Amino acid sequence: MYADIAFQQKIGDQETLCYKVPKTLETSIKEGQLVNLTLRRRTATGLIWRLHDEKPSFKTVDIKEITNETPLLTPDQIKLANWISEYYFAPLFKVLKLFVPAKIFKGKTMKPRIKEKPIPEKLNLKNLTIAQKNALDTIESAEHKSSSKTGAKVTPSNKFLIHG
């Protein structure tokens, strides 16, 4: 089995490089995973772009190891990246930077920016003016009247259509 590997840097005229998948990794390797391999006598990190059984006409080097078990990109994301590259004539390595942060290719872990916040039990409304209170009361009473007459619920799109 062979794998076409994409990198986040220009690697010549090719979009990807072909590497041999060792027998020990064949059962666990998937498209979209990060792998460590040898590139220009150095250890480099690449992303498995495509798996295939087509033996290339040149000698291939084995993939050293899988960096992460969970693929970073889904097959649909890989298709989208290929489409972007072809449609906009953009090099694949530049498109790949849109999908995977460079820090991940360098082996650094990223902290999530979004932190969960508990949903408050009751919202603290700011002090409303008399006019705002009257408007709120009118909307709430119209909501009650409308749902009791028709069974319809007032939605954001129809809440200002107050029926008498």
Image (spheres, helix red, strand yellow):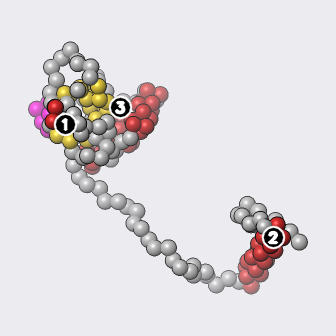
Residue at x 29% of width, y 29% of height = 51
Q: Are marks 1 and 3 in contact (CB under 8 Å)?
A: no
User: How far is disc 1 from disc 3 in space, using C-alphas?
Assistant: 25 Å
- Dot 1 or dot 3: first in sequence order is 1
Task: Name the residue tied to disc 1.
Answer: 25
Considering every residue shown, the one lying at the far top of the view is 57
Task: Name the residue tied to disc 3.
Answer: 92
| Label 1: which secondary element | helix
Considering every residue shown, the one lying at the far left of the view is 41
**Number of residues whose C-alpha sits closer than 10 Å to that of mark 3, classed few (under 14), some (14–19) or many (20 or more):** many
Task: Name the residue tied to disc 2.
Answer: 146
> For the residues carrying marks 3 and 2, which lies nearer the camera in this image?
2
Horizontally, is 164 left or right of 21 in the view?
A: right
- Dot 3 or dot 2: first in sequence order is 3
Residue type marked 2: Ser
Q: Nearer the viewer, residue 24 or 44?
A: 24
Q: Are marks 2 and 1 in contact (CB under 8 Å)?
A: no
User: How far is disc 3 from disc 2 in space, using C-alphas?
Assistant: 57 Å
Range covered by the magenta-colored residues: 38-43
| Label 2: which secondary element | helix
Residue at x 31% of width, y 30% of height = 50
